[in-house]
Amino acid sequence: MNLPLIKMIDSPPVWLAGFAAVAYGQGRLFPIESDAVSHVIGGALVALGLGLMALAFVEFRRHKTTVIPHQTASALITRGIFARTRNPIYLGDALVLAGLCLRWDAVISLILVPVFVLLITQRFILAEEMRLESGFGAEFRQYCQQTRRWV
């Protein structure tokens, strides 16, 4: 379980923190004042994102498999929140980022959300899917046909 430092740094939470920091900076330097409704929606998106992550972590724990992107899974999870999206944690990350942009009056930074999604797909999801297909074959391919990558 000891990951090299570069793999610990090159992780989705670090990327999320970096994108959030940019959004926070934009909101402080160039705020676009929003109304209370935007702040409530932002808070709801953050809560929804954290909820998705929590549901996913419960499933990882229940199936006794790794949540760490650079490691090989010992189980293919297709139930619970994973029946709705193949990547609930990454979807949760994107929702948290969008919500923070709204909460921090960083509306301009909402453009970071699709950039974050693209980056996460390229840096993590595609490799994870290759490992899952290698390990679970037809079962994983069938899961992909039934469940979307994001939503």
Image (spheres, rainbow, N blue to C red):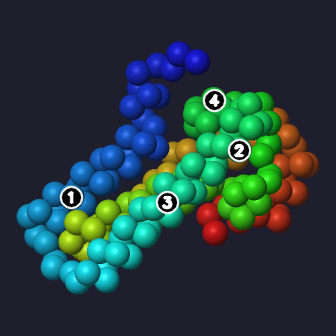
Q: Nearer the viewer, residue 144 or 68?
A: 68
Q: Give me the C-alpha separation between circle 4 and circle 3.
A: 23 Å
Residue found at x 17% / y 63%: 26
**Residue 76 higher or lower than 32, as above or below:** above
Which secondary structure lies at badge 2? helix
1 or 3: tag closer to the N-terminus: 1
Residue beneath label 2, please? 59
Q: How many marks?
A: 4
Which secondary structure lies at badge 4? loop
Residue beneath label 1, please? 24
Badge 4 density bin: few <14, some 14–19, many ≥20, Cα 10 Å: few
1 or 4: tag closer to the N-terminus: 1
Q: Nearer the viewer, residue 19 or 40?
A: 40
4 or 2: tag closer to the N-terminus: 2
- Where residue 49 is drawn, which disc sits there? 3
Quadrant that contains the N terminus: top right
User: Type of residue at label 2?
Assistant: Glu
Q: Give residue 40's position: percent from left, percent from top.
A: 34, 75
Quadrant that contains the C terminus: bottom right
User: Type of residue at label 3?
Assistant: Gly
Q: Give me the C-alpha separation between circle 1 and circle 3.
A: 18 Å
Q: Give residue 93's position: percent from left, percent from top.
A: 47, 55
Q: Nearer the viewer, residue 140 or 123?
A: 140
Q: Give me the C-alpha separation between circle 4 and circle 2.
A: 17 Å
Q: Quadrant of residue 6?
A: top left
Residue found at x 69% / y 39%: 60
